Image (cartoon, rainbow, N blue to C red):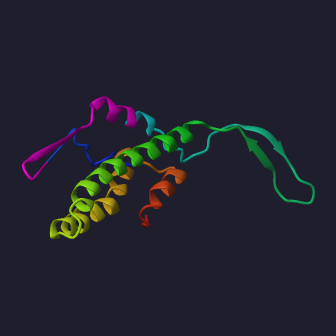
């Protein structure tokens, strides 16, 4: 059995820059909803075939399966979650890099926070939601190529 997540999602994010505070709050109900959506891993395909047939002069039997909608829900929720993360990151990029173009602070923020955060974030998401479904792994691998 795969161990559960060792990462915890913080409920409050608080940042202070130039004497201005920025706060982002994640509700517990949202975290519970996300865990509920990703509780099934879809490692084993346990659907019943709708039709089984053989093709003449070809070895083996073939089966047609009906669609399973749950993995599509996970894919949509994961896409929305990544979009939300990208929107928050884009706000910080605009505020601290684009508006302060050419300053040392903009370079430090970009190379010291934005790029490492973008490369790191898929791994806690994989671990927190215990994602092992191949399609969802592909969505996260698209951002960072890693080996298991």
Residue 58 falls in image quadrant: bottom right
Q: Is residue 115 above or below residue 78?
A: below
Locate the C terminus and report the quarter of the image it occupies: bottom left
User: Toward the viewer: 59 or 78?
Assistant: 78
Q: Residue at x 44, y 43 (%)?
A: 80
Residue lying at the far right in this picture: please name it: 56
Q: Is residue 118 visible?
A: yes
User: Toward the viewer: 68 or 94?
Assistant: 94
User: Toward the viewer: 78 or 105?
Assistant: 105
Left or right of residue 95: residue 122: right
Residue 109 falls in image quadrant: bottom left
The reply to whether the magenta stretch includes residue 148 is no
Left or right of residue 99: residue 135: right
Where residue 141 sits in the image (x, y, percent)? Answer: 46, 60
Q: Is residue 1 visible?
A: no
Q: Residue at x 23, y 59 (%)?
A: 99
Where residue 21 sits in the image (x, y, percent)? Answer: 12, 44
- Segment colored magenta: 16-34
Left or right of residue 54: residue 20: left
Where residue 137 sits in the image (x, y, percent)? Answer: 48, 55
Q: Is residue 119 above or below residue 124?
A: below
Q: Residue at x 76, y 43 (%)?
A: 64
Where residue 46 sits in the image (x, y, percent)? Answer: 62, 40
The reply to whether the magenta stretch includes residue 33 is yes
């Amino acid at each position: 059995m795969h161990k559960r997540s060792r990462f915890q999602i913080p409920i409050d994010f608080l940042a202070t820059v130039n004497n201005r505070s920025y706060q982002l709050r994640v509700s517990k109900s949202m975290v519970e909803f996300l865990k509920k959506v990703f509780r099934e891993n879809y490692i084993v395909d346990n659907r019943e075939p709708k039709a089984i047939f053989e093709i003449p002069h070809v070895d083996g039997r073939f089966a047609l399966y009906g669609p399973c909608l749950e993995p599509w829900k996970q894919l949509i929720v994961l896409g929305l979650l990544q979009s939300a993360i990208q929107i928050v990151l884009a706000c910080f990029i605009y505020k601290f890099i684009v508006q302060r173009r050419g300053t040392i602070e903009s370079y430090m923020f970009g190379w010291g926070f934005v790029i490492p955060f973008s490369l790191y974030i898929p791994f806690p998401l994989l671990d927190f939601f215990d994602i092992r479904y191949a399609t969802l792994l592909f969505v996260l691998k698209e951002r960072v190529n890693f080996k298991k």
